């Protein structure tokens, strides 16, 4: 069962198929291209991503949450932890990876930090909680700040087919 986690301004809950239009709009936003070079994501790939999120919860007991406004239930984005075998190296690939993406209306308001802190507190309290990793474009100062607030520190710099990456790690609590 996917827990519901509550913050001051956000509620984190399982993604529901009723969220698909908002989810596809989020990932289809051309503005994401600035720091996510594989974006925007096509609608059919969004369907695959939502199924992958459901699979994570069923098989690992963790995954991505929908981020919604506590005030009115508006869909703001997604956040969570997942396994992706990126081939970056054992120091990165072996740990659950954290990630967050918020829509344009939610960016720059501290909501990603609030949601990330809630997710990591929950994850730390689970039997499977422990070391996690995250990665972002080296120029994505906002995501780097969110990660640092959650206790992430530089693991190493790397590069993929789209350019330089900052790989970070965090140890429970």
Image: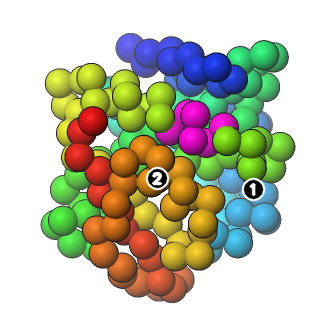
Please report the residue visible at 75 percent of the width from the left and 56 percent of the height from the top: 28
Looking at the image, which residue is at 71% across and 63% down? 32
Residues at badges 2 and 1 in contact (C-beta under 8 Å)? Answer: no
Tell me residue 18's x, y (percent): 70, 24
Report the magenta residues as a range.
111-116
- In the displayed structure, does residue 71 sit left or right of residue 13? right
**Callout 1 environment at 10 Å: few (<14), some (14 to 19), or many (20+)?**
some
- Mark 2 vs mark 1, CA separation in Å: 24 Å
Residue 17 appearing in the image: no
At mark 2, the secondary structure is helix
Disc ID at residue 69: none
Q: Name the residue: 60% across, 66% down.
A: 141
Q: Which residue is mark 1?
A: 28
| Closer to us: 56 or 104 | 104
Location of residue 142 with respect to 87 vertically, above or below = above
- Total numbered labels placed on residues in the image: 2
The picture places residue 122, in percent across and down from the top left corner, at 37, 25
Q: Is residue 157 magenta?
A: no
């Amino acid at each position: 069962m996917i827990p519901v986690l509550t913050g001051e301004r956000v509620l984190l809950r399982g993604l529901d198929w009723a969220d698909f239009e908002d989810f596809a709009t989020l990932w289809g936003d051309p503005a994401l291209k600035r720091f996510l070079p594989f974006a925007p994501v096509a609608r059919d790939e969004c369907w695959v991503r939502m199924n992958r999120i459901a699979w994570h919860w069923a098989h690992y007991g963790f995954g991505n949450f929908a981020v919604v406004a506590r005030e009115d239930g508006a869909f703001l984005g997604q956040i969570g932890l997942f396994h992706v075998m990126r081939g970056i190296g054992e120091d990165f690939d072996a740990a659950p990876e954290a990630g967050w993406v918020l829509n344009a209306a939610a960016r720059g308001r501290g909501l990603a930090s609030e949601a990330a802190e809630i997710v990591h507190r929950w994850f730390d309290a689970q039997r499977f909680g422990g070391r996690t990793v995250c990665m972002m474009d080296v120029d994505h100062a906002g995501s780097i700040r969110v990660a640092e607030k959650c206790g992430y520190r530089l693991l190493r710099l790397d590069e993929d087919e789209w350019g330089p990456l900052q790989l970070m790690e965090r140890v429970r609590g």
